[in-house]
Image: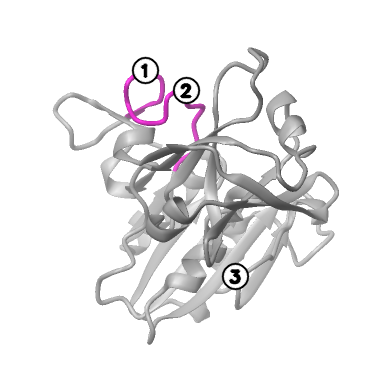
Amino acid sequence: MFISEPVVEKLIELDEHIFLLKIKSPEIADIIRPGQFVNIKVCNSVNPLLRRPFSVCDVEDDSFYVMFNIHGEGTKILAEKKKGDCLDIVGPLGNGFNLDGNFEKAVIVAGGMGVAPFPFFSKKISDGKSIVTFIGGRTESEIVTYGLENIFIATEDGSNGLKGNVIDLLKKNESHFIDQNVKFFGCGPNPMLKALKEYCLLKNIDCEVSTECAMACGFGICQGCPIESTTNSEKYLLVCKDGPVFNIKDVVL
């Protein structure tokens, strides 16, 4: 883990209110793994006071990318950053996805901005493993396909792809993965993750999910991001330190 002041290289607007921020940091870019995150202090003032957690979306040479949409004061400030601005960043943090194992196909399931960790994931998946990606959003404006491959889309209003949610999309396209040696990887809103867990348990499919939670410190000191455990005798785990990636069998969603 590094506490450093990486430099903004560029800000890319993918769509209205959806951004990619490229940050130069050889230390973080060299060791980050898919599913890990960084905690960013967006400004030097006390408003907002707390750091903001962001999944690392992609890595390119000595730089990494974070993807975000504007949904509060912190992300609004981040969307105003310019080339050469310094950022106060702690990372890499948490535990990422386990890409090892004997599965032959990775099935990505993402809702809204839950696509954020998967461009880097798709780049780092082992040779010989294929990928199929299922994306869901409320409307077409919430669908982001940057860095993804073999994509199927659902929107709740029917403006792009199947009309329905991403679990409906899975059920409609089971021929692309059922009876194959697969492992599922998910990220998105908690209701989506809960539905994904129910689906995978019913189908007896191994699945890891990246959970979302407000975090202050990012490494377990503040105890502010508990998630209920199904296996730990202490009952609760911490999203920042024990996650954010968990096997669906190990946590209550």
Badge 1 crowding class, 10 Å Cα cut-off, few under 14, some 14 to 19, many 20 or more, is few
| Dot 2 and dot 1 residues touching (CB under 8 Å) | yes
The residue tagged 3 is 172
N-term-proximal mark, 3 vs 1: 3
Q: Secondary structure at mark 3?
A: helix
- Read off the residue under disc 2: 216
Q: Could you say whether the residue bearing mark 2 is in a helix, strand or loop? A: loop
Tell whether 68 sits left or right of 1.
right
**How far is disc 3 from disc 2 in space, using C-alphas?**
39 Å
Mark 3 is on which residue type?
Lys
**Residue tagged 1:** 222
- The image shows residue 85, relative to residue 184, as above or below, that is above
Q: Amino acid at mark 2?
A: Ala
206 shown above or below 152: above
Confirm whether residue 121 shows in the render: yes
Magenta-drawn stretch, dominant element (helix, strand or loop): loop
Stretch in magenta: 211-227
In front of the other: label 3 or label 2?
A: 2
The foreground one among 54 and 201 is: 54
> Disc 3 to disc 1, how far (Cα)?
43 Å
Residue type indicated by callout 1:
Cys
Q: Secondary structure at mark 1?
A: loop
- Tell me if residue 50 comes above or below residue 127 in the rendering: above
Q: Which quadrant of the rendered structure holds the C terminus? A: top left
Q: Position of residue 196 (x, y in %)?
A: 47, 52
The residue positioned 45% from the left and 77% from the top of the image is 177
Left or right: where 1 falls relative to 85:
left
Mark 2–mark 1 Cα distance, whole angstroms, equals 7 Å
Answer with the quarter of the image where residue 153 lies: bottom right
Q: Nearer the viewer, residue 188 or 18?
A: 18
Q: Residue 190, position in %: x, y?
A: 52, 38
The x, y position of residue 248, in whole percent, is 34, 48
